[in-house]
Amino acid sequence: MTDSREGLLSINLQSIADNYQDLVTRVAGGARCGAVVKADAYGLGMSHVAPTLYRQGCRDFFVATQAEGESLRDALGDDVPIVILTGVRAGAELECARAGLMPTLFTLELLRHWVGTCARAGLEAPCAVKVDSGMTRLGLSAEEFEHLLRDRELLRLADIRMLLSHLACADEPQHAQNIRQLRSFKKAGQRLRTLCPNIQLSLANSSGIFLGKDYHFDIVRPGSALYGINPVPGTPNPMRPTVTLSLPIVQKRHLSQEQSVGYGATQRMAAGSWLAVARGGYADGIMRAQGGRGHGWACGRKLPIVGRISMDSTTFDISALSAKERESLQSIEILNQDLTVDEVAQYADTIGYEVLTSLGHRYFRRYI
Ligand SMILES: *Cc1c(COP(=O)(O)O)cnc(C)c1O
């Protein structure tokens, strides 16, 4: 039995819109809700997702790179603020400013260079500045931030619109790091605001929104929660799932004797077992670590993944299905509302973010 279709990845834009509105409600009265659409909207397609969010009222967009910012600018038009979270490419400052993209600058040297380069070219150069409040990734150190506050000339010339910082442990509400970072960021924000009164403050990612109002400041920056990943791990997911991934079955087999399955002959199946080999493997983002541990979903049931996952195919144990179900079975879902991104991530020893951003380019994509 063969099937020529590729896997089908269905992306529910309505669920993404609903998730956005859910977050808007949670920050209402305090902050604006932005959206992080980096990495092609976490693999789901920025050119579909960003206009959907725009129609929901989102007016603050965040991407990781300048190239992402340029394609987002094309998708959204000229008037929407777009922040590039990892700064501007050296030598590409003028293109960045001309495209109206706001780089996040995380050292004084980068800030000075940005301000000087754009001023010499006579370009407006709004930007965001990132301060490190404890994540120890990108951001001005405490000492550098003091220098910035003292450099009145730089503050006068620089058009700093936003002060950002990022939480390291927002998905662990009890972690003491959260409150430490909150205090540090709040203080930095208050001090900079006395010198730049119009500056907007932004700290919270998806999980940060759920830490409470104190964390919201002026703009929140959710990514994962928009795409259905649970922002509050260990408690029921308040977000809607957004993806269904269905793999076509390309061969079904009945074992007449006990046999090993797949590369490395790592798993043996008993005589009488029924197997289904589906198109789609680790090259399509079906994480290899799920081999022998993960599941697919069909006929309202979980079906175990058997043996190692190959580059282009995955084998499932379908012995639990009735003869009739087996015969009519044409595809197996590997992500859906019952088999969520977070659950799949657990089988693969990773996080939902990696599951989504790894989804390959070989699927047929359908937007709902
Ligand atoms: C990716 C990212 C976000 C979004 O984080 P989620 O956990 O996906 O909500 C927010 N801020 C920064 C700086 C990021 O890099």
Image (tube, rainbow, N blue to C red):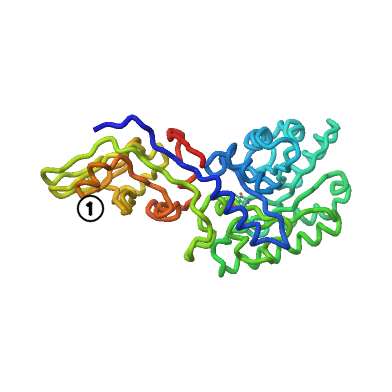
Q: Can residue 100 be seen?
A: yes
- Which of 224 and 332 lies nearest the eye of the viewer? 332
Give residue 77's position: percent from left, percent from top. Answer: 71, 35
- Which of 138 and 329 lies nearest the eye of the viewer? 329
- Label 1 environment density (alpha carbons within 10 Å; few <14, some 14–19, many ≥20): some
- From the viewer's perspective, tell me whether residue 255 is left or right of residue 145: left
Q: Which residue is mark 1?
A: 320
Residue under the image location 36 percent in, 32 percent down? 5
Residue under the image location 73 percent in, 34 percent down? 96
Query: Looking at the rendering, which quadrant does residue 253 occupy?
Result: top left
Q: Can residue 264 be seen?
A: no
Give residue 70's position: percent from left, percent from top. Answer: 67, 34
Which quarter shows the N terminus?
A: top left
- Which of 265 and 47 lies nearest the eye of the viewer? 47
Residue under the image location 15 percent in, 50 percent down? 270
Give residue 206's position: percent from left, percent from top. Answer: 59, 56
Q: Identify whether 58 is placed above or below 253.
A: below
Residue found farthest to the left: 257
Beta carbon at label 1 within 8 Å of ligand 1: no
- From the viewer's perspective, tell me whether residue 259 is left or right of residue 89: left
Q: How many marks?
A: 1
Mark 1 lies on a secondary structure that is loop
Query: Label 1 sits on what residue type?
Result: Ala
- Which of 363 and 136 lies nearest the eye of the viewer? 363
